[in-house]
Amino acid sequence: MTRTLTATPVGDHRAHLGEGPVWDADRQRLLYVDIEGGAVLAHDPAAGTTQVLLRHDDYVTAVLPHRDGRLLLGLRDGLGVWDERAPDRPPALVVPLQADDGSLRCNDATVAPDGAVWIGTMHLDEGEGAARLYRVANDGTPRPQRGGLTISNGLGFSPDGRVLYHADTPTGRVDALVLAADRHSIDDARPFASLPDPAGQPDGLTVDAEGGVWVALWSGGTVCRFTTDGALDVIVEVPASHTTSCAFGGPDLTTLFITTGGPEVGGRGDAAGALFRAEVGVTGLPATLATVEVP
């Protein structure tokens, strides 16, 4: 039987396009980005406050804590690095990706259990087939892993690290990418879960400690959990139409945080653009620190 839960907004901050939440265990805070607003944000659940760490003059599509204390960022043209200890210095592009194609930008990203970064691109006008999914190895080398995409979106690894769940949003489907033994490439890809159009389109996602896959549905105002066999298990209703991504956080990783898009991207609801939270009865997986070599 499918459970239905409700998320509630936290704090007063409203993003144009909130995305990419990740729990920073060292600082006990939730990091996320405002893609359209060019911002990196930090929410402190204990204090109930949200701080703008960075205002950039272009897209910021992802934020990933690095083991050296800096933050890796998804930028328009590739993977960047920024040090919040030197806030006046702008982010530096360190791994260009399809930088010669102005119709593309980076999108969602995640860190694999081995510290490598998986990051996708998207076509700004949603032109079909031009985007890719890359793996950036620990030596900083990017290699395309999946092509023919339109909006490479949600990324999350199974608890054993053998499967990478991935959404190409316009397909209305989340795929399970089975990795090779060395975890450096994709051995097989199969459909995992499909969403009917009225339910919304799959955007960002996360995986819990039981292997359940939580998918935010753009224009659907929900986050749905699918069991390991792809069956719908939980629906979290969000009072904002454009749910974009989700991540587990809090001291015990038991709170599901959900990002949303504001009116600037068509979001509807009094709290559109807010960060939301829900207690969903399962525990998340700890985020891995990136170990990609960056200057």
Image (cartoon, grey):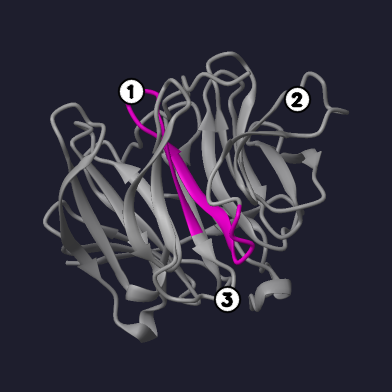
Other residues around mark 3 within 10 Å, as few (<14) / some (14–19) / many (≥20): few
Please, what secondary structure does the residue beneath circle 2 have? loop
Position of 176 with respect to 267 (left or right) is: left
Distance of mark 3 from mark 1, alpha carbons?
A: 33 Å
Task: State the residue position of label 2.
Answer: 84
Residue 5, above or below 53: below
Residue 97 horizontal/vertical position (percent) = 53, 46
Describe residue 262's horizontal placement relative to residue 24 as left or right.
right
Tell me if residue 42 is in the magenta stretch.
no
Q: Nearer the viewer, residue 68 or 80?
A: 80
Q: Quadrant of the N terminus?
A: bottom left
Residue extending farthest front: 100
Front-most of residues 269 and 215: 215
As drawn, is 205 to the left or to the right of 8?
left
Q: Residue at x 62, y 16 (%)?
A: 69
Sequence-earlier tag: 3 or 1: 1
Q: Which stretch is magenta? A: 100-121
| Residue occupying image coordinates x 67% and y 63% | 273
Q: Which residue is mark 3?
A: 125
Q: Which residue type does callout 3 highlight?
A: Asp
